[in-house]
Image (spheres, rainbow, N blue to C red):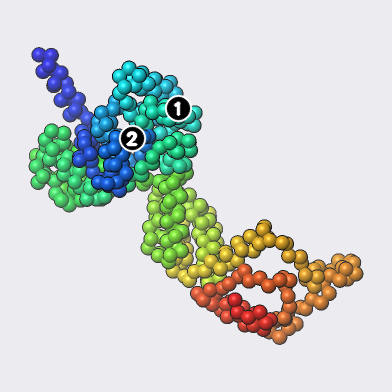
Amino acid sequence: MAGLFDQQERKNRNAARPLAARMRPRTLNEFVGQQHFLGEGKLLRRMLKADRLGSMIFYGPPGTGKTSLGEIIANHTRSHFLVLNAASAGVKELRAALDEARSRLNSSGDRTILFVDELHHFNRTQQDVLLPDVESGVVSLIAATTANPFFTLASALISRSQVFEFQMLGQEEILVLLKQALTDKERGLGLPESSATEEALNFLAEICDGDARRALTALEIGAKSLDASKPVLDLEVAQESIQKKAILYDSKGDQHYDVISAFIKSLRGSDPDAAIYWLARMLVAGEDPRFIARRIVIFASEDVGNADPQAIVLANAAAEATERVGMPECRIILAQAVTYLACVAKSNASYMAINAAMDDVKHERIIPVPVHLKDGHYAGAKRLGHGTGYQYAHDGAGGWVDQDYLGVEKHYYEPTQRGHEQHFKQRLEELRQRRGLGNT
């Protein structure tokens, strides 16, 4: 009787687990996604075949299989699997896990895989506790984190680990998991495939943002909330079974830097649609619109410059209006500035000019101010000859005189042929020819 009760208890416990937990892959063949490092011939697959697993850091968004793959690796290598959650475990728990692994290795020779979830929650002291046993091979560390390890983890730990970046699962990959979970009689919902429409499954696969856990949770809610009068999970049920998505965006982590990078590069590449999307991504995620506005002002000068001198005026006006108006209305102002800046001609000539000049000032011999350009208005200046020979440009024909303003020949500003700057280029070429300097 005890065996029957134990079996029933296990069955009840399994049924109480969420669908996403029940459907976790048990083998590499069941694992879906991450073929860029797990496919045949790829690095992690080769490491598993060679049975040469060092410490690894699994980095990527939620629901992409980090924990599941850690368990699969432990089973594949026949290693003992210890799990710690860095958000709740302290140094005491960490030391106890390492002592257990050391004792197991000494007594039976069995290896231990220590899986630390959300490793970025460990402070540097806790991370340092790991280092000796990671180095000596007492444990093979598999650390999972949603935060960029190069921002959040100690460099000593990173240097001793192989970093694998998990990508969000594709829609087709999520769809495979949903269909498996829907029909699996042992671990899944055990329903016929016809109990959910393709439209509903496609919606869940798309809206989950590559998070398998989120898609499976919505599928379970939808399927278990069906009633006898409407036994099919359709699009309407699917839409009601998933919460409004939370945008993956850490205002201090790599998502912040990656998205603003994509935004600026889209502006530079003159793609208003992409730029607007990245703007929306930041605003919906709660990015400070003043930060975005400041970057727009910088862009207007750095990447548009004199190809459209009006750009800096509009960008600065947008920044001031954003400060004054705030969200949600400032999204309209920012969108106007973004679409304008994306569409206008681009030039970084003034940006390159100041960089080159500052580099010369820092690393080359300082150029003295020519005597005729020195201030001649104070008492005694004439005795020093300061200002002697200076020609007032407005007295010359066309407001220009042939005069040396630097003392050496240097061409820092090289206008492009784009937008308004082409007029500057033509003007400078004419003036340089008149000074006998020729074209650059």
User: Can residue 286 be seen?
Assistant: no
| 199 or 87, nearer to the observer | 87
Spot occupied by residue 171 in the image (x, y as percentages of width and height)? 24, 50
Q: Amino acid at mark 1?
A: Pro
Q: CA distance from mark 1 to mark 2?
A: 17 Å
Q: Residue at x 33, y 29 (%)?
A: 113
Q: Is residue 56 left or right of residue 392?
A: left
The residue where tag 2 is placed is: 53
The quarter holding residue 52 reads top left
User: Can residue 150 be seen?
Assistant: yes
Quadrant housing the C terminus: bottom right
| 50 or 132, nearer to the observer | 50
Quadrant housing the N terminus: top left
Spot occupied by residue 86 in the image (x, y as percentages of width and height)? 40, 30
Spot occupied by residue 308 in the image (x, y as percentages of width and height)? 52, 71
The residue where tag 1 is placed is: 132
Local packing at callout 2 (Cα closer than 10 Å; few below 14, some 14-19, many 20+) is some
Local packing at callout 1 (Cα closer than 10 Å; few below 14, some 14-19, many 20+) is few
